[in-house]
Image (cartoon, coloured by chain):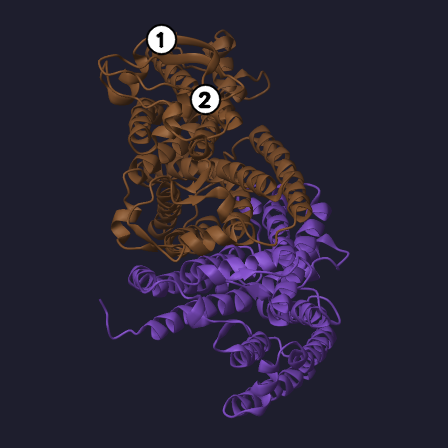
Chain colours: A brown, B purple
């Protein structure tokens, strides 16, 4: 394999692995903030137990998130030196903000949050908890600002092959940033909620767990469900907003996402392919099932809106055949999961309203709980699929229409070195994934510590 | 905007900020890495656990200084960032694998019953990270071939006799400061022979760094002139003399079997001298002897934006890190792991 392909595989796979953990760190830290606030407000010990229990899992996600995040920062230099040099004026700067402002905040306050129970006042402790959440959120914001600028690189001029910033605020708040940040941030919360609800469902299905333990997890389930009522429909709306932003600023990506080849004639609507497969010459579909006019409605919110087809763009300036296929199906997976999670939320609320969310009923409504168990990984799959669309759909550009991916690679890279390091990353990360599931399993099997008492400072 | 700051001054300010972050990283995380390497040796799990737990609340925050230094280097000197990291591919990846293993096994150790395995992996990760950092410093000082603003050498260029000596020096100095930190945190010799080992690791560090200093002029004439030309030679003489004095003081305290924080503080003093010496040796080069700080700097617009955005925040980051260290400086004798606190 050539060094460009292996470098892309290395960056893609290490980034895909890393994203799982901040996802859970953001989601869990939100839950922890809510629980600590409720505890401080009501002094009800049950919130304290919730906080203590879920913090254990948070510690694991944060550790793996830190461990897998540091390599990404350095990979920009090791494998993408020319990208760093050309785009560093903006991109490196924003990563500098991320590490100084956001990550440093999280890491320092994590120490106080975890170890400081008996050393700081309840208020300072809550503040530390809040700062972890704020730090994680800011971190997501800066990363999304940097990545969004790679999608819509405005506020810069090209000087001697380097992208020099002319207007920082324009570059940071490019039209993609806020939409993508919110879409990702809500994805973090939604994925974590359904992971937590999946864990709760698993415990509630267990025949061994005690009444007290089940009561604890049914509470968690209800808290998560309440947050999901807001989050799941919001995410569908943000997804729609994100789609129209892509249609406007990255029409070639949108066309690839839909395998849409020919621009619709004025006065007619573009059809939406439910399923499709491109032909070998990569200029049309060899197979497709279409629904009339839907693509125009989805992207322009009008029956006859113009949607440029892939054939409008030179083959060198749009994603390749294999990339087309990946983004087309990744997009469908993501959208399907968005709706499945929404329906699961509706189902959960309906059960709750009918008074069926009780420990006694868990013995009867096993299918209901199994559906939530199956929902555990869905948010993560949808997030990964969304990133596939975002990053592979941007190809062959690393900075859209300004810098090609192949021109961002380091010079003097040795393919075998890159393959070897990618292999080591893969082995370590695979082991981490298995160990994470194992340790979470152990933590859940052990259950919450109901004897834990809040410290008296 | 801000015309009183000329381009060279802006570049120097950012060089200072990156340098300060690197220095803080070495001063704070050096001891953590050293303790990690040390934790490979004791037979009793309780001793290993003690070493790991003394750094429990703070090592995450200490490691952030590396992330901050990386982020600032990327932002303020993007071309140099790309050249240095791609030239030092193998050292950097070695360090990263070490940091990954270390960070994750620290938490797995707390939750697992197979403590022996995870404390071993934690120690191994620390060792690997230290080796990677030594190789990286060695590779940088051995010289990087640059043509047309790109790295033009090969993957193993970093590996020179100088690099070997510097790697030994870096590892031994980490162990050295790790021992001193352990005595400071526990207030006693945790196992017999700690004082002797401080002397041995200190001596090996000294010999390795002395050897490296003698080898440096063989890599570049720049380093030769630093010892011969005014004013850098006088600065280097002063720094060397100060380092010698601090070392003698340290040896004296070791013979007195001192148990307070002075040992650790003296180690940090010696570290600061070594880093100042290196600064005098390379200034104003970012990649000696090919690329200066001024050649590598980002556009004026970027450096100003970073200064306005990050400048006011830097003291805040320093302040809450200081607070963190202060909160956990009073906890002698009750070293718990995260999992113990959470009832695992």
Observer-nearest of A323 and A71: A323
Q: Position of residue A135 (x, y in %)?
A: 38, 48
Observer-nearest of B99 and A14: A14
Residue B157's quadrant in the figure?
Answer: bottom right
Screen quadrant of the C terminus of chain B: top right
Residue at the spot 50% in from the left edge and 35% down from the top edge: A20
B42 sits to left or right of B158? right
Look at the numbered disc 2 and give the secondary structure of its residue: helix
Mark drawn on residue A291: 1
| Earlier sequence position, callout 1 versus callout 2 | 1
Q: Is residue B215 above or below residue A314?
A: below
CA gap between label 1 and label 2 equals 16 Å
Count of numbered badges drawn on the protein: 2
The subunit carrying tag 2 is A
Same chain, labels 1 and 2: yes
The subunit carrying tag 1 is A
Residue B269's quadrant in the figure?
Answer: bottom right
Q: Is residue A202 above or below residue B324?
A: above
Residue at the spot 39% in from the left edge and 32% down from the top edge: A189
Q: Position of residue A179 (x, y in %)?
A: 30, 35
Q: Is residue A156 above or below residue B218?
A: above
Residue B213 can be seen, yes or no:
yes
Screen quadrant of the N terminus of chain B: bottom left
Q: Which residue does the numbered mark 2 point to in the structure image?
A: A328
């Amino acid at each position: 394999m050539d060094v460009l392909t292996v470098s892309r595989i290395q960056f893609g796979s290490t980034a895909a692995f890393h994203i799982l953990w901040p996802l859970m760190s953001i989601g869990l830290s939100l839950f922890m903030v809510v629980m600590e606030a409720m505890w401080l407000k009501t002094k009800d010990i049950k919130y304290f137990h919730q906080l203590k229990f879920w913090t254990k899992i948070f510690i694991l996600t944060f550790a793996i998130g830190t461990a897998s995040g540091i390599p990404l920062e350095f990979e920009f230099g090791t494998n993408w030196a020319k990208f760093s040099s050309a785009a560093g004026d903006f991109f490196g700067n924003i990563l500098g903000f991320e590490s100084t402002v956001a990550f440093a905040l999280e890491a320092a306050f994590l120490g106080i949050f975890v170890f400081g129970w008996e050393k700081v006042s309840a208020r300072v402790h809550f503040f530390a908890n809040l700062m972890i959440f704020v730090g994680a959120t800011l971190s997501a914001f800066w990363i999304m600002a940097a990545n969004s600028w790679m999608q819509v690189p405005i506020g810069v001029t090209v000087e001697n092959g380097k992208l020099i910033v002319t207007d920082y605020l324009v570059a940071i708040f490019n039209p993609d940033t806020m939409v993508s940040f919110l879409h990702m941030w809500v994805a973090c919360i939604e994925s974590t909620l359904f992971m937590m609800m999946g864990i709760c469902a698993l415990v509630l299905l267990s025949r061994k767990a005690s009444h007290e333990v089940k009561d604890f997890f049914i509470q968690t389930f209800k808290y998560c469900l309440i947050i999901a009522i807001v989050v799941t429909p919001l995410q569908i709306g943000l997804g729609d907003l994100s789609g129209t932003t892509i249609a406007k600023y990255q029409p070639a990506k949108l066309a690839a996402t839909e395998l849409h080849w020919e621009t619709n004639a004025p006065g007619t609507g573009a059809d939406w392919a439910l399923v499709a497969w491109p032909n070998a010459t990569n200029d049309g579909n060899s197979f497709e099932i279409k629904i009339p006019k839907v693509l125009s409605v989805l992207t322009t919110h009008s029956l006859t809106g113009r949607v440029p087809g892939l054939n409008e763009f030179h083959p060198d300036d749009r994603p390749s055949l294999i990339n087309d296929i990946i983004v087309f199906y990744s997009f469908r997976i993501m959208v399907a999961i968005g709706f499945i999670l929404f329906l699961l939320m509706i189902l959960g609320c309906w059960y709750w309203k009918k008074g069926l969310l009780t420990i006694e009923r868990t013995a009867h409504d096993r299918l209901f709980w199994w559906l939530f168990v199956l929902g555990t990984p869905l948010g993560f799959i949808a997030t990964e699929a969304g990133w596939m669309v975002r990053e592979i759909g941007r190809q062959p550009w690393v900075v859209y229409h300004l810098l090609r991916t192949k021109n961002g690679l380091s010079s003097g890279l040795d393919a075998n070195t890159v393959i070897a390091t990618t292999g080591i990353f893969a082995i370590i990360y695979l082991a981490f994934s298995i160990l994470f599931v194992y340790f979470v399993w152990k933590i859940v099997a052990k259950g919450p510590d109901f004897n834990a008492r809040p410290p008296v400072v | 905007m801000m015309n009183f700051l000329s381009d060279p001054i802006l570049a120097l300010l950012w060089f200072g900020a990156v340098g300060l972050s690197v220095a803080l990283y070495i001063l704070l995380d050096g001891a953590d890495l050293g303790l990690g390497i040390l934790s490979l040796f004791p037979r009793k799990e309780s001793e290993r656990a003690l070493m790991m737990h003394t750094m429990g609340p703070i090592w995450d925050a200490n490691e952030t200084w590396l992330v901050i230094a990386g982020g600032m280097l990327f932002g303020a000197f993007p071309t140099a960032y790309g050249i240095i990291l791609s030239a030092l591919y193998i050292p950097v990846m070695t360090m990263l694998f070490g940091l990954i293993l270390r960070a994750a096994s620290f938490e797995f150790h707390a939750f697992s019953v197979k403590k022996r395995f995870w404390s071993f992996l934690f120690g191994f990760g620390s060792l690997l990270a230290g080796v990677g950092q030594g190789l990286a410093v060695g590779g940088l000082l051995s010289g990087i071939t640059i043509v047309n603003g790109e790295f033009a050498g090969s993957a193993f260029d970093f590996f020179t006799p100088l690099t070997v000596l510097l790697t030994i020096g870096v590892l031994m100095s980490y162990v050295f400061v790790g021992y001193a930190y352990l005595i400071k945190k526990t207030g006693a010799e945790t196992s017999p022979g700690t004082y002797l080992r401080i002397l041995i690791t200190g001596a090996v560090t000294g010999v390795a760094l002395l050897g490296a200093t003698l080898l440096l002029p063989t890599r570049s004439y720049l380093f030769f002139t630093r010892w011969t030309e005014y004013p850098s030679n006088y600065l280097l003489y002063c720094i060397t003399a100060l380092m010698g004095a601090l070392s003698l003081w340290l040896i004296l305290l070791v013979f007195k079997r001192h148990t307070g924080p002075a040992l650790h503080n003296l180690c940090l003093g010696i570290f600061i001298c070594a880093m100042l010496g290196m600064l005098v040796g390379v200034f104003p080069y970012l990649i000696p002897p090919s690329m200066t700080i001024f050649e590598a700097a980002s556009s004026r617009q970027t450096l100003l934006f970073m200064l306005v955005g990050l400048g006011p925040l830097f003291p805040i980051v320093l302040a809450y890190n200081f607070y963190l260290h202060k909160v956990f400086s009073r906890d002698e004798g009750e070293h718990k792991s995260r999992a113990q606190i959470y009832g695992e």
